[in-house]
Image (cartoon, helix red, strand yellow):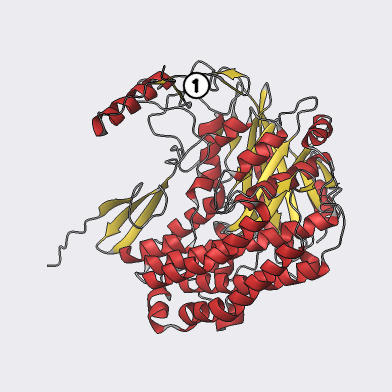
């Protein structure tokens, strides 16, 4: 018995796994139930956006940036617009800054409600999932009324915003806040702050100590849940946020202690829901009248940007943490020299992978769900398809042929004959 | 510490550094410190930044192909307990025929994934990197192809020919 043989087992979680919402791969080395090592492999969702961005002009990138992610679509094009404005020295009207703050907070409400539901789902409490996503519909309706779409609302443009918030929208937002305050938030608090079952499951699971959160530069609710007081809206003195009284939220204000576990991260999200509603109300009160964009038309903006030189950095606190966009001008051209972005999930994934070492295997799904990973944000840069060893590039014709074969296999009655179309993509012949 | 004080400390310690403070013209201005260093001094300066603020946050590596050189810019945030914090961009360069920079993954642990990303996408290698595997691209990705390069090592138009484009349905009749 004394010569006990220790053996380690490697378990891949992902790319496709019931515990994960999006494709990512964690290779977990186990000693019994205890995790010894976690290795992360990304790239299952690569779309080559940076590469595509090398062939698009400033205005086109605005809409491309929006499509990096469906949930934080406003954050991406907001941050990109800020980077371009910093680069070219464009002044944004004050009213536009307030509208940006309001839409940003509405987006934060919908993203946090979504994640609270996902956390409920990860611990098998599906009632929370259904009810919080039902409550989320209300804010989606408001966003649809303002921007015209449930996601990808295209609010921002370079030098301002594209849609104004009128009296009708204001009433709608205030009604929504009243509904959340009176009907939704008491239930959410009951579940995530006071429910003994939820507390028993989430307390001390997936702990990220403050030291690891700093070393691995965790972001957003993940960092604040570990007691790092870091919020880009506050440290960056971002736009009108200082006037609205922004403060980083830590679980200390709600529960009195900071442990850095999954429970604390959820507490931060609940706190931020309250904070977002207050910020929206203040912004609606203080919002001045006036113009909403610096340039009347996009082509005027493009002419101005063509002359710009220098570089700019935009930073914004997306629902998941700090988002950075960098733009460098290419004088005389409509296409920027370099466009680069970094999403909060990227550092958070490595922080949570490090924090899982020493924990139980059963905590993996809930710990991963607790950082609210957004893999479509993180993976964005692959370009070609290659088969083992050989440089085999699939052409349009090959893909078309394969898809026709598959369709025939499923349903032999389909008669249509699709043809390759080709075309150009930003000057490159396809 | 204000950005001016911070830049003074850096320039005193490293006289060869070019540094400036730029302020944007938005209605809510924000100062950023931009410094450029040679790659020989680069690691020393990163260690010094870590001494100034042990909690400094490493945000991003922005690497780019600039013709005959490769450039990497590092964004760091210092003193984020205060508002406004110091937003610092450290830039360094290396020639294309010797694309090597010293790694900072031992100074800032969170730099490792960014360095792995830059290695596979731009072919800018980091000496002494603890984990040189690919992160985003598949393990069997062809050698010597760096997607974000703008020269012949990048993705040529022959490689992307017809890759996954929508098709039109042939009209009947």
On the question of residue A221 being in view, the answer is no
Q: Residue at x 81, y 67 (%)?
A: A243
Q: Position of residue A430 (x, y in %)?
A: 53, 19
Q: Secondary structure at mark 1?
A: loop
Chain on which label 1 sits = B
The image shows residue A73, relative to residue B164, as above or below, that is below
Q: Residue at x 39, y 26 (%)?
A: A386
On the question of residue A51 being in view, the answer is yes
> Where's the N terminus of chain A, which quadrant?
bottom left
Residue B120 shown left or right of residue A407 in the figure: right
* Crowd around label 1: few <14 · some 14–19 · many ≥20 (10 Å): some
The image shows residue A93, relative to residue B82, as above or below, that is above
The image shows residue B170, relative to residue A51, as above or below, that is above
Q: Position of residue A184 (x, y in %)?
A: 54, 76
The image shows residue B61, relative to residue B1, as above or below, that is above
Residue A267 shown left or right of residue A401 in the figure: right
Q: Position of residue A333 (x, y in %)?
A: 76, 25
- What residue would you read off at disc 1? B160
Outermost residue, left direction?
A1
Residues A181 and A118: in front is: A181
Q: Quadrant of residue A255?
A: bottom right
Residues A105 and A35: in front is: A105
Give the mark count.
1
Q: Residue at x 67, y 67 (%)?
A: A172
Q: Position of residue A422 (x, y in %)?
A: 51, 18
């Amino acid at each position: 018995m004394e010569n006990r043989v220790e053996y380690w087992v490697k378990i891949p979680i992902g790319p496709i796994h019931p515990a994960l919402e999006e494709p990512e791969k964690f290779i977990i080395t186990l000693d019994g139930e205890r995790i010894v090592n976690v290795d992360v492999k990304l790239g299952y969702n690569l779309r080559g956006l940076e590469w595509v961005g090398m062939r698009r002009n400033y205005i086109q990138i605005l809409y491309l940036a929006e499509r990096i992610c469906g949930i934080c679509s406003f954050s991406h094009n907001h941050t990109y617009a800020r980077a371009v404005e910093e680069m070219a020295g464009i002044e944004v009207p004050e009213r536009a800054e307030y509208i940006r703050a309001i839409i940003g907070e509405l987006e934060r409400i919908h993203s946090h409600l979504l994640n609270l539901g996902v956390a409920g789902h990860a611990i098998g409490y599906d009632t929370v999932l259904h009810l919080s996503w039902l409550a989320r519909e209300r804010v989606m309706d408001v966003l649809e009324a303002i921007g015209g779409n449930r996601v990808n609302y295209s609010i921002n443009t370079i030098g301002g915003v594209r849609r104004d918030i009128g009296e009708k929208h204001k009433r709608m937002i205030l009604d929504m806040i009243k509904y959340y305050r009176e009907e939704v938030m008491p239930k959410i608090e009951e579940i995530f702050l006071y429910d003994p079952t939820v507390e028993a499951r989430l307390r001390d699971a997936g702990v990220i100590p403050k030291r690891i959160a700093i070393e691995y530069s965790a972001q957003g609710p993940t960092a604040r849940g570990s007691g790092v007081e870091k919020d880009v809206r506050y440290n960056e003195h971002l736009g009108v946020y200082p006037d609205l009284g922004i403060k980083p939220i830590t679980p200390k204000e709600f529960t009195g202690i900071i442990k850095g576990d999954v429970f604390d991260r959820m507490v931060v999200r609940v706190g931020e829901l309250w904070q977002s509603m207050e910020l929206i109300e203040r912004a609606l009160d203080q919002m001045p009248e006036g113009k909403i964009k610096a340039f009347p038309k996009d082509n005027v903006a493009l002419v101005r940007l063509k002359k710009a030189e220098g570089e700019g950095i935009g930073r914004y606190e997306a629902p998941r943490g700090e988002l950075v966009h960098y733009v460098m001008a290419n004088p005389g051209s409509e296409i920027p020299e370099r466009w680069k972005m970094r999403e909060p999930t990227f550092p958070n994934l490595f922080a949570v992978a490090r924090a899982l070492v020493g924990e139980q295997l059963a905590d993996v799904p809930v710990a991963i769900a607790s950082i609210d990973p957004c893999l479509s944000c993180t993976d964005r840069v692959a370009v070609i398809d290659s088969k083992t060893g050989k440089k085999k590039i699939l052409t349009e014709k090959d893909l078309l042929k394969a898809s026709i074969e598959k369709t025939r296999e499923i349903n032999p009655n389909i008669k249509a004959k699709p043809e390759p179309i080709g075309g150009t993509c930003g000057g490159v012949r396809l | 510490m204000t950005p001016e004080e911070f830049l003074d400390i850096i320039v005193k310690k490293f006289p060869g550094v070019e540094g400036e403070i730029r302020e944007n013209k938005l209605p809510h201005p924000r100062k950023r410190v931009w410094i450029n260093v040679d790659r020989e001094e680069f690691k020393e300066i990163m260690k010094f930044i870590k001494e100034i603020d042990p909690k400094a946050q490493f945000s991003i590596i922005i690497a780019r192909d600039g013709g005959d050189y490769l450039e990497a810019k590092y964004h760091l945030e210092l003193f984020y307990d205060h508002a406004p914090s110091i937003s610092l961009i450290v830039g360094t360069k290396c020639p294309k025929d010797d694309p090597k920079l010293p790694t900072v993954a031992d100074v800032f642990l969170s730099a490792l994934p960014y360095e792995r990303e830059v290695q596979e996408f731009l072919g800018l290698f980091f000496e002494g990197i603890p984990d040189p595997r690919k992160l985003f691209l598949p393990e069997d990705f062809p050698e010597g192809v760096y997607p974000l390069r703008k020269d012949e090592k990048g993705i040529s138009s022959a490689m992307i020919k017809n890759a996954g484009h929508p098709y039109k349905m042939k009209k009947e009749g």
